[in-house]
Amino acid sequence: MRLPIKALAFAVILFGATLTAKADTLDFTLTGGGNTFIFSLPSNPTPDSSTVGTNFILDNILVTQDPGTPGSIAFSTDLTFSNATAGGGIGFPLPSLPPTMLELLLVGPQLYTGLETAPMFSPTSTPFSLSEPKGTDDFTLAIASEVPEPSSIALLATGLFAFAATARRKLLVH
């Protein structure tokens, strides 16, 4: 009886280690400069336009600025994601900017894998800085999955299985 339980536990652990996360929707939280911006995107969005080797654009994305505060606003904007060759980063126009800024342009690492015509996002946390004026306000973009990752679920199942097996063994002994 012990061998099948160990074999089953090993199979669950092995299977769980080979699973990859695949969330359909990801939550983006951009913080910096005294503001927070949140929006959600598919993990594999279809760009509205793209320039292969440079960037892609997603049109009319709902963004909430400073959620949960009295000055909170929601607006639709076009998001531009640049690849590493173009300096990486993200940019988008904002309705409530100081007169000297018409668009929030952040430089940093490339946020997606794949081509600009078929990008794919993954959960991460990445630092960015303003493109202009340089050296001002650091930003952080956190991309989080809305659903648990399959490997986390497999790990939980393995733990519950081990707990149940131990409890069963103790009940049979007494």
Image (spheres, grey):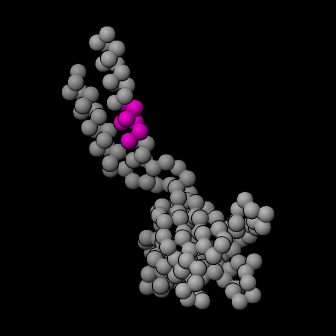
* Residue 83 can be seen in this image: no
Residue 152, given in percent of the width and then of the height, sits at 42, 46
Residue 73 is left or right of residue 5, and the answer is: right
Q: Is residue 46 above or below residue 161?
A: below
Magenta: predominant secondary structure element?
helix
Residue 27 is left or right of residue 165, and the answer is: right
Picture residue at 73% right of the left edge, 84% below the top: 98
Magenta residues, as a range? 155-161
Q: Residue furthest left?
A: 3
Q: Is residue 145 above or below residue 5?
A: below
Q: Is residue 45 above or below residue 116?
A: above
* Residue 97 can be seen in this image: yes
Residue 25 colored in magenta in the image: no
Residue 152 is left or right of residue 15, and the answer is: right
Residue 159 colored in magenta in the image: yes
* Viewer-proximal residue among 115 and 85: 85
